[in-house]
Amino acid sequence: MTSFTNNQIDIASLPKMEDLKLESIAPSYFRILLFNSLIPYLFIIGCSIALKFFAETDSFINTSFWYVILILMISFSIQIFIFRLGFKKRLYALREKDIIYSHGYFINETTTLPFNRIQHLEISRTFLERKIGLSTLKIYSAGESGGDISIKGLPKSVADAQYAFLTKILNDRL
């Protein structure tokens, strides 16, 4: 009969996240982020122009129009700046026994998903991703809902290779 042991682990001897070489997603994915964030701004600007056109004699609307345009330009610039900072934090690594994905600037979230917890895989491509040659690799975990990983902005060849690699691992464990 073996006795139960629960020895303490020296925290200093643990591997450091900083030593892990994480890969960045394709730089061209930033264009998709720009385009997707631009659509609501263009809609609001279009509505503002229509309102200004129909109420061209009302000085309050004419003055408000320029304030709305200024606020939209400032908020869009801030959003793009934050996207640019956060874009550099979209990193992933495929290791022997798991996959790691890290993203977010203000709130950085790192998810590590062991291969034995992967339930199924999916590759998706939006219209813009197809035009630029990118894909999204979605990895769904078994059980916990917070363990799913969706890596957007992978070159199609990289996403296909990782999909094939992970599919082989899933099939081998059956």
Image (cartoon, grey):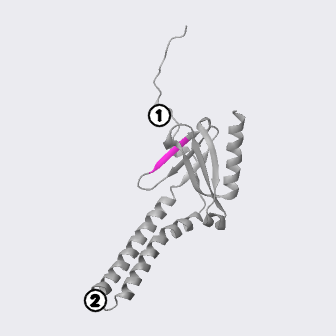
Which region is colored magenta?
Answer: 108-112
**Image location of residue 167, percent across then percent down:** 69, 43
Amino acid type indicated by mark 1: Ala
**Residue located beneath label 1 in the image:** 12
Foreground disc of the pair 2, 1: 2
Q: Is residue 20 above or below residue 133?
A: above
In which quadrant of the rendered view does residue 130 lie? bottom right
Say left or right for 112 vs 40: right
Whether residue 109 appears in magenta in the rendering, the answer is yes
Quadrant occupied by the C terminus:
top right
Where does residue 17 sit, x and y in percent of width and height?
A: 51, 43
Which residue is identified by label 2?
59
The quarter of the picture where the N terminus appears is: top right
Check the image and name the residue furthest to the top: 1
Q: Residues within 10 Å of mark 1 (few under 14, many from 20)?
A: few
Q: Residue 161, percent across and down?
A: 71, 50
Can you give x and y, in whole percent of width and height, for residue 158 in the image? 68, 54
Q: Earlier in the sequence, mark 2 or mark 1?
A: 1
94 on left or right of 18: right
Report whether 46 appears left or right of 153: left
The number of discs equals 2
